[in-house]
């Protein structure tokens, strides 16, 4: 195993607007202090904190029409902890019949929910934020178990979810539109932004609760109802969130269905009574959803994969680049669509940066975060994901693998060693495809034009970063990089107020920000003739 690093070193940069609070949580973890849950919760909140148990495991159920129910089939499947491969929960193996019931409940609820005032919806979102805050420790512990991430990281994600709910609680009350006016003599025109209807939402396994809130908050704020499918691998915290919603949201406004992408996800995207489908997932899943949704002409919102370039010019702070790549490139075990995984450095600093990256990536402590609180990086989500990552690494010439690249000697758990690869070609799979693991590549460029060309020469367009002290070069790079987000001298900070979404095969539509709220509305032109 690599030499261990302190948690404080792993928090020099955090991809959150509230990174100071995240750092404080990590400090608590390092000192062994774990906060207990609130004691003044309602019965519903206490049940969420304690969980539904059967045989000492979380007993997850669907949430449809305001009630917790089994799948129509009665079948269930097991959920495992990727850190040690133990069974920690079971969940309903749902199908098309469950989607049918949920869509009907959501459609019925929409008739009244759409007529609630922005103030009403805002207050509900604020109360849900409060409930998540009171259940934070329980939610974070479950996320740690289900995804295999360090506890402090999981707590930080709950904080982000809370912030997002609060942001959209405010945004619900300030929807903007074009000014009313007399654009034709004798008529007044005005624009209405109205809810779309029933929204199907499919969220991933890398940030289960946080990604669910990123979808739920703007959709509810805009007056829509929801049928949501969490990843079949990580439904636990979404289920606990549903318990927190019980009695807060009108029955049928939020419905959650567990199960596989096919049939549950495919049924959501093709259902004629679902008006829009929003997915965060892989490019392949995005293509399936878009094709399925086309039959009913429903709106599609896709946040897909990425292959983020990191352009390092000769005047960059190389030590900061290397430490940021260590932290953000290995954040969530590299299972992050905006991960700084593709470093493209000026040939004048290439060798020095290579040495710095090798030192940084070799220093990371990884293992089971449940049994060792000093761990900075846990496992990847599944055996299939581990094998997929090694499939990419195995295609690389061994002489180009400078750090990691080998299987981790662990009896149990899906671990991948932090890996640094250099000297590969632009056309190689490790450059062109999203690996979604703790793998970083390093390339070199000789001119700014070549740097931009290498950065843009992939099918993805989600995020990128530029490292330079030259303001003119930074702005030129921002303009020429074909990515939805471009950072300068940092990588992966984000805020609820600014949009997140990509170009090209990274999808379309935005999460976060007022743009996300607008994505969950439809525009109506009202034109009134007056005497």
Image: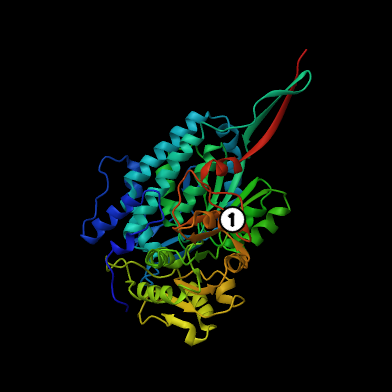
Label 1: element kind: loop
Q: Residue at x 49, y 83 (%)?
A: 400
Q: Residues within 10 Å of mark 1 (few under 14, many from 20)?
A: many
In the figure, 225 relative to 398: above or below?
above
**Can residue 146 be seen by looking at this rendering?**
yes
Question: Camera-side residue: 292 or 379?
Answer: 379
Q: Residue at x 36, y 77 (%)?
A: 412
**Is 189 positioned to the left or the right of 264 in the image?**
right
Question: Camera-side residue: 267 or 70?
Answer: 267
**Is 450 positioned to the left or the right of 129 in the image?**
right
Residue 506 position, x and y percent, is 60, 59
Q: Residue at x 52, y 86 (%)?
A: 397
Residue 133, quarter of picture? top left
Residue 502 position, x and y percent, is 59, 55
Residue 456 position, x and y percent, is 61, 64
What is the count of numbered marks?
1
In the figure, 32 relative to 425: above or below?
above
Question: Camera-side residue: 471 or 427?
Answer: 471
Residue tagged 1: 502
């Amino acid at each position: 195993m690599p030499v261990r690093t302190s948690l404080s070193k792993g928090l020099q940069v955090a991809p959150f607007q509230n990174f100071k609070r995240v750092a404080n949580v990590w400090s608590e973890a390092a000192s062994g202090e774990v906060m207990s849950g609130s004691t003044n919760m309602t019965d519903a909140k206490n049940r969420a904190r304690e969980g539904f148990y059967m045989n000492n495991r979380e007993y997850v159920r669907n949430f449809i029409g305001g009630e917790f129910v089994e799948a129509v089939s009665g079948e269930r499947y097991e959920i495992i902890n990727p850190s040690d491969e133990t069974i920690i929960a079971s969940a309903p193996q749902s199908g098309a019949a469950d989607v049918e019931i949920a869509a009907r409940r959501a459609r019925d609820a929409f008739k009244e929910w759409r007529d609630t005032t922005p103030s009403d919806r805002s207050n509900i979102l604020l109360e849900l934020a409060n409930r998540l805050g009171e259940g934070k420790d329980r939610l974070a512990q479950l996320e740690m178990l289900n995804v295999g991430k360090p506890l402090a990281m999981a707590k930080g994600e709950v904080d982000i979810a809370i912030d997002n709910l609060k942001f959209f609680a405010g945004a619900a009350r300030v929807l903007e539109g074009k000014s009313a006016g007399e654009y034709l003599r004798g008529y007044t025109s005005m624009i209405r932004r109205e809810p779309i209807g029933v929204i199907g939402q499919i969220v991933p396994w890398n940030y289960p609760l946080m990604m669910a809130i990123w979808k739920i908050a703007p959709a509810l704020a805009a007056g829509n109802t929801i049928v949501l499918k969490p990843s079949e691998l990580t439904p636990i915290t979404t289920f606990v969130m549903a318990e927190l919603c019980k009695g807060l949201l009108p029955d049928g406004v939020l419905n959650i269905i567990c199960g596989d992408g096919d049939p549950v996800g495919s049924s959501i995207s093709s259902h004629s009574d679902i008006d829009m489908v929003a997915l965060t997932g892989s490019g392949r899943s995005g293509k399936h959803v878009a094709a399925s949704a086309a039959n009913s002409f429903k709106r599609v919102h896709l946040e897909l994969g990425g292959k983020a370039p990191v352009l390092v010019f000769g005047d960059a702070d190389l030590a900061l680049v290397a430490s940021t790549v260590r932290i953000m490139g290995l954040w969530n075990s590299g299972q992050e669509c905006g991960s700084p995984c593709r470093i493209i450095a000026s040939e004048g600093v290439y060798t020095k940066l290579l040495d710095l990256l090798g030192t940084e990536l070799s220093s990371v402590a990884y293992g089971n975060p449940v049994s060792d609180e000093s761990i900075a990086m846990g496992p990847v989500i599944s055996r299939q994901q581990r094998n997929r990552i090694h499939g990419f690494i195995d295609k690389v010439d061994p002489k180009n693998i400078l750090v990691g690249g080998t299987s981790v000697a662990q009896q149990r758990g899906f671990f991948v060693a932090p890996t640094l690869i250099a000297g590969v070609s632009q056309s190689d799979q490790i450059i062109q495809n999203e690996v979604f693991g703790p793998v970083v590549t390093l390339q070199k460029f000789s001119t700014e034009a070549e740097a931009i060309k290498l950065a843009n020469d992939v099918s993805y367009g989600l995020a990128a970063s530029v490292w330079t002290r030259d303001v003119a070069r930074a702005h030129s790079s921002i303009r020429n990089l074909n990515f939805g987000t471009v950072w300068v001298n940092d990588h992966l900070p984000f805020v609820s107020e600014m949009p997140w979404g990509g170009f090209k095969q990274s999808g379309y539509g935005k999460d976060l920000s007022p743009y996300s709220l607008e994505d969950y509305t439809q525009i109506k032109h009202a034109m009134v003739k007056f005497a």
